[in-house]
Amino acid sequence: MMLTNETIANRQFDFLSGEVILIDKPFRWSSFKVVHEIRKATGIRKVGHAGTLDPLATGLLILCTGKKTKSVTSYQDLKKTYTGTFLLGQTSETMDLEAELTERKPLDGITREKILTARDKFIGVIKQLPPMYSAVKHKGKSLYHIARKGKTVERELRDVTIYKFEIIGIELPEVHFEIECSKGTYIRVIAQDLGDELSCGAVLGRLRRTAIGEFSVENALGVDGFKALIKENKIIETEA
């Protein structure tokens, strides 16, 4: 059974045999930090997550413990749904607000119609170049380690699928969106590419993962809430 805020009543947890946990990742936490905190709380070393979220993003992480870590790939392959904002007229090395904004352009002539026309080019199967500030591997090293040294390397374009891309509000420079996409999609790259299409630049301002497949962040536990459950001793077995 998946461990959510709806399934926790009157049951014990067997983290060693395996549990699947829905967690709402806090702002400015790395996905690894969430895994680390769950490891500490459960006493189980074997904990993995089904899809990284950037530190500035919040929302749904699916974590698997013990023997259930064998199921991680099946969750990674599911569609992802995100909401957030793009900030038009600005650029940065990381394509979001983690790095200093490097350029500002006026938004004269940017209309809703132009935004929607540009948006339409990012629906369906599209090509994406993985960002240098990412966990993608190059000769065994994560790209972000290389990027932090001020270097870039050749990367191959990848096919990703955008199933839904809705513009749910425009308050320039902010453009509010909801995107449903395949695994491996970088929303930061969509921000940059949309800004390039509009000839004004754009960065990702805010991002929240609201769903993975049929699993919703509305049913996720906060990290502190999860730790509180552990203190109630609803545990069958942990590692020594």
Image (tube, helix red, strand yellow):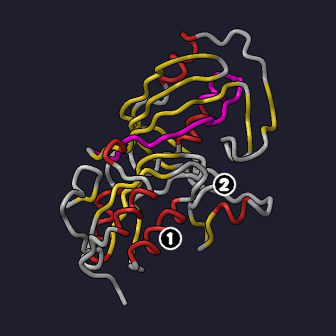
Residue count near mark 1 (Cα–Cα under 10 Å), binned few <14, some 14–19, many ≥20: some
Q: In this view, does 5 lie to the left or right of 123?
A: left
Does residue 185 sit above or below 168 in this rendering?
below
- The front one of 150 and 52 is 52
x, y percent for residue 134 = 60, 56
User: Sequence-wise, which precedes: disc 2 or disc 1?
Assistant: 1
According to the picture, the residue beneath numbered tag 1 turns out to be: 36
The question of residue 205 being in magenta is answered with yes
Magenta region, residue range: 194-213
x, y percent for residue 233 = 30, 72
Amino acid on which the number 1 mark rests in the picture: His
Quadrant assignment, res 124: top left
As drawn, the label of residue 229 is none
Write the residue at 48% across / 57% down.
Answer: 52
According to the picture, the residue beneath numbered tag 2 turns out to be: 132
Q: Residue furthest front?
A: 232
- The front one of 202 and 5 is 5
x, y percent for residue 23 = 40, 55
Quadrant assignment, res 109: top right
How far apart are the alpha carbons under marks 2 and 1? 25 Å
Amino acid on which the number 2 mark rests in the picture: Met
Does residue 102 sit above or below 114 in this rendering?
below
- The front one of 44 and 48 is 44
Write the residue at 44% across / 74% down.
Answer: 39
